[in-house]
Amino acid sequence: MVAVIKILIAFVALTLPSVNSAGEPKDNTKNAQGTDSSNIRNEEVVFLAHAKALRALEKLEVRSAVCGEKMMETKVPIRILPTLPLSKREWGTVFTHLAAKAMGRCEEDAVNKAFMAFARFKNFEKAIMGDKILNTGFYSMELLCCLAERGKLETELHYMKIDGKIRETLEAIPELNEPFNPILTIEAMGN
């Protein structure tokens, strides 16, 4: 909290007009190169926000690839799983839900940063550019927000129907909290 207050104080100090030794306002429109910095066009703000959004999306793609590779290659060793009164279908629900949660944790920081950068860009773009839309490839707010979210929620609802003590036992297993391949894991269980 103290850090936030210091940042706010610094921001206010930077935005207040400066005065010279005689108490008169200084001309703050010249930057270090001696050029007028007050003539920044609105479009420049949009283009910078666009560039930041694209960089955040690139970082998200890299992080998703790292997490996805780990998920695809990792099979939870069956020997570490306790014997529990679950059907094959329930085990499938458990693995699918816990694998999705683990993948979400692995990508979370990159997803949040990409979503916020993209949301800021889209907000500035709409306010300043109107109907002129900059290219963001296949990315959209809906994709960043909600891709596959309905399926995850449906799986979570099935998961929540499993006894709470069983869920606690499974959630305490470290290997089920890291990205893993639920299909390879369920196949390793056999019938």
Image (cartoon, rainbow, N blue to C red):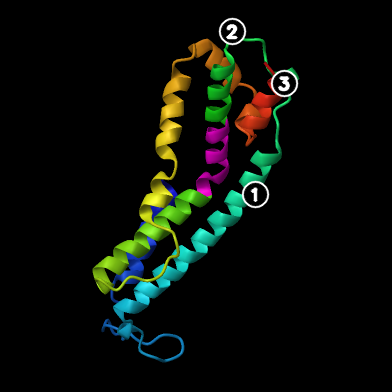
Q: Is residue 115 left or right of residue 68?
A: left
First along the sequence among labels 2 and 3: 3
The number of numbered badges drawn on the structure is 3
Residue lying farthest top? 85
Residue 22 rendering spot, x and y as whole percentages: 29, 85
Residue type of the residue flagged with mark 1 = Val
Where, by quadrant of the figure, is residue 128 drawn? bottom left
Q: Which residue is mark 3?
A: 78
Mark 2 Cα shell of 10 Å, populated few (<14), some (14-19), many (≥20): few
Which badge, 1 or 3, is on the more N-terminal residue?
A: 1
Side (left or right) of 23 relative to 190: left
Residue at 27%, 81% in the rendered image:
23
Q: Is residue 28 visible?
A: no
Residue 157 pos. (x, y %): 41, 23
Given residues 36 and 138, the one toward you in this image is 138
Give above or below for 32 relative to 16.
Answer: below
Q: CA distance from mark 1 to mark 3?
A: 24 Å
Q: Is residue 108 part of the magenta span, yes or no?
A: yes
Q: Which disc number belongs to residue 66?
A: 1
Q: How many residues crowd around disc 3 within 10 Å: few (fewer than 14), some, or many (20 or more)?
A: few
**Magenta extent:** 99-109
- The residue pinned by badge 2 equals 85
Q: Residue at x 70, y 19 (%)?
A: 190
Magenta stretch: dominant secondary structure: helix
